[in-house]
Image (cartoon, helix red, strand yellow):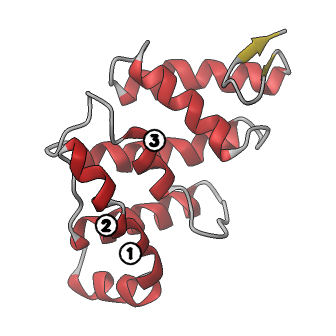
Amino acid sequence: MKEQEIYELMKQDTYYLEKVLQSNSYTRQFGLQLSEHEVLELLQDRKCSLQEQERVEFGEGILQKIIFAFCDSPYIYQDNYVDMIAQLQNIFYLYKNESMDELTDDELLSYMKEKFENECQGSVEHLEDTCLEGFARMIRAGTCRFMGANNEWSEE
């Protein structure tokens, strides 16, 4: 990313930058911290993902929710933190589309986290190419639905 792009993004997303940087106070307990430059890169990735998926996002966006959902994972550590969060953010937007927006953000995040930690054992590629692909197919076919507060899924 060019320095000029970073500064332009910084002007536009000062609020989001500060909100995501505030998440460091929580993630430090897991040995994770983002620098200002890393947050700006993640915000730029967000912008690109939204454009690529032809989505519009209102409010604070999903980035901070992804950080809070995944920061306690044993598969995420400081050296891969930025890359993992960027990948998770990208596939989140992809599968919001692929599931035809039938899921809330929290439902999709819950499913992603459960599969990432267990079946995928920290593999974002397996999460994207296998788990979420099959899940989105079942959502589109109407053969799977979210069961509410217990984060349970039902295949019909």
Seen at 26% across and 36% down, the residue is 76
Q: Secondary structure at mark 2?
A: helix
Left or right, residue 81 beside residue 111: left
Residue 116 picture location, percent across and down: 42, 24
Mark yes or no: residue 82 visible. no
Residue 25 is left or right of residue 129, and the answer is: left
Q: Residues within 10 Å of mark 2 (few under 14, many from 20)?
A: many
> Mark 2 or mark 1: which comes first in sequence?
1
Q: Which mark is residue 39?
A: 2
Would residue 58 be visible to someone looking at this image?
Answer: yes
Q: Mark 3 vs mark 1: which is more N-terminal?
A: 1
Q: Classify residue 1 by image quadrant.
A: bottom left
Give neighbour class at mark 1: few <14, some 14-19, many 20+ (Cα, 10 Å): many
- Identify residue type, mark 3: Ala
Relative horizontal placement of residue 78, taking residue 150 as reference (left or right): left
What residue does disc 3 label?
A: 69
Kindly identify which residue carries mark 1.
17
Task: Tell me the residue at 66%/60% (across/down).
Answer: 55
* Comparing labels 3 and 1, the label whose residue is closer to the camera: 3
Residue found at x 64% / y 42%: 106
Secondary-structure class at tag 3: helix
* Cβ atoms at labels 2 and 1 below 8 Å apart: yes
| Element at label 1 | helix
